[in-house]
Image (cartoon, rainbow, N blue to C red):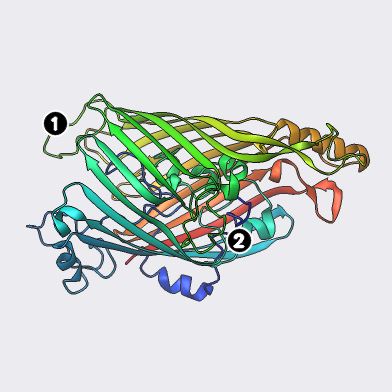
Amino acid sequence: MKKIIDKRALLECGTPIAISAVLSLGLVPDAFAQSSNEGEQAQAQVPAAATADPAASADPNVAAPTGWRQRANLFGELGGLRPWLDNYGISFDLHETSEYMGNLSGGTDRGGAYQGVTQFGFVVDTQKAFGLNGGTFNVSALQIHGTSLTSRNLQTLQTASGIEADAGTRLWELWYQQSLGNVDVKIGQQSLDQEFIVSQYAATFMNATFGWPVLPSTGLPAGGPAYPLASLGVRARASFANGVTVLGGVFDGDPQKLNASGTNFPLGNGALVIGEVQYALNPPSANPSDAQPVGLPGTYKLGFWYNSNRFDDQGVDTGGVSLASPASNGVPVSHRGNYSVYAVADQMVWREAAGSPRSLGVFARVMGAPGDRNLVDLAVDAGITLKAPFNGRDNDVAGLALGYAKIGSHARDLANAQAAYTPGYPSRRAETVLEATYLYQVAPWWQLQANFQYFWRPGGGIAQPDNPSLRVGNEAVLGLRTTVQF
């Protein structure tokens, strides 16, 4: 998560901690990352593009709850504004996510940092608004505030929080989607982590790698078109009755090039091509009155991406000499293009009873790429989540996950070569993070999330800045997040 705008720091937050405490009287880590399947959404660490307001999609013949603990949004129907806008096909979303995280051990320094992001967006249903059937217009913006714990204290590859980034205000997504039967096409500025490489169960966790994985975050220009960045492009999707969905797209290859505010819409910076095939096993019926599948639901995905830009070698110069050698010319070999293949699996493995909220889900995701031009050439994450762990807590989620980032072969060779010139210089192999989390639903519009993470060999085993003979120590990180849906 780096490059021109460091994604670890791209959601740095500066709002006072007192504000976070006030917000925690009525907020939540809301459903961030969206699945590519219509209607499927999961809690995650990266904000989802604005979607239709839950209250607006409810049965219009049933009055929305008015009690502050029952309604979908803190401000409810806003004196009738939400249903009035819904008559014209307009719904809007406003939420604030705030968190405080700190490392108790290891790292380059000890301490904590506040991060926060405010997201606003609205969606227009063109059927209601203009009589154009199957059309959806979406626009969203971000106000990012605070400080990045990862860049300040941790120096990890797998960023501790998915909302860390440079402070500022920026346009995020701006697109139009048209449905044509079982096919829909989306054109405009898009953030790919909203549809591609998504894991439903991984989205519960706060570490960024369980959202947009560490491999594209470190291997693509500016970390790729993923929160809080987006690229101009076109995406097509086709869904079939047998549970298969195919989606693919072509996007500008560098989402940050001349686009710090998200409002310049550049093209000509290479191309990023991405494709994915999905299979839904025992998917729930979209109509609650229909008979539901007896088997446990799951989703399986295979995909690839290719970026046409040039990428520097991670360890060898143009003369074939190690970049660590005093004889090196200091100019790395330039490779044409970068690519990766990946697989994602989400599977519910246990449910207390048909229709019961209590269930156990597992996920696994693996992604590989060439080791000469990628700092990370293999990324693997896996975990387990338990929904409704206690009686009466139907929307709480407890989870445990593991993320693994293997250092690419040429970057490992570079570190080994550096040891020849700096005795004791640590080798680089891999970084591993373990995360345990509990998401507590206070109200439909407010969630609190407690979090613990432990990192082995931060950065894959990087050296201390002030003592290159020692590597950065293992890190224990504690955090608390609160998100409110206004």
User: What residue is drawn where x is 48% and y is 61%?
Assistant: 264
Name the side, left or right, on which 243 lies relative to 251: left
Secondary structure type for disc 2? loop
Q: Amino acid at mark 2?
A: Ser
User: What residue is drawn where x is 86% and y is 40%?
Assistant: 324
Q: Amino acid at mark 1?
A: Ala
| Quarter of the rendering occupied by the C terminus | bottom left
- Image x and y of residue 116, in percent: 49, 65
Name the side, left or right, on which 230 lies relative to 175: right
Front-lying residue, 339 or 257: 257
Q: Earlier in the sequence, mark 1 or mark 2?
A: 2
User: What residue is drawn where x is 51% and y is 52%?
Assistant: 162
The residue under label 1 is 291
Picture layout, residue 174 above or below residue 33:
below
- Image x and y of residue 13, in percent: 54, 67
Neighbour tally class for label 2: few under 14, some 14-19, many 20 plus, Cα within 10 Å? many
The reply to whether callout 1 and callout 2 are in contact (CB within 8 Å) is no
Secondary structure type for disc 1? loop
- Image x and y of residue 129, in percent: 17, 59
Neighbour tally class for label 1: few under 14, some 14-19, many 20 plus, Cα within 10 Å? few
Say which quarter of the image contains residue 52. Answer: bottom left
- Give me the disc on residue 148: 2
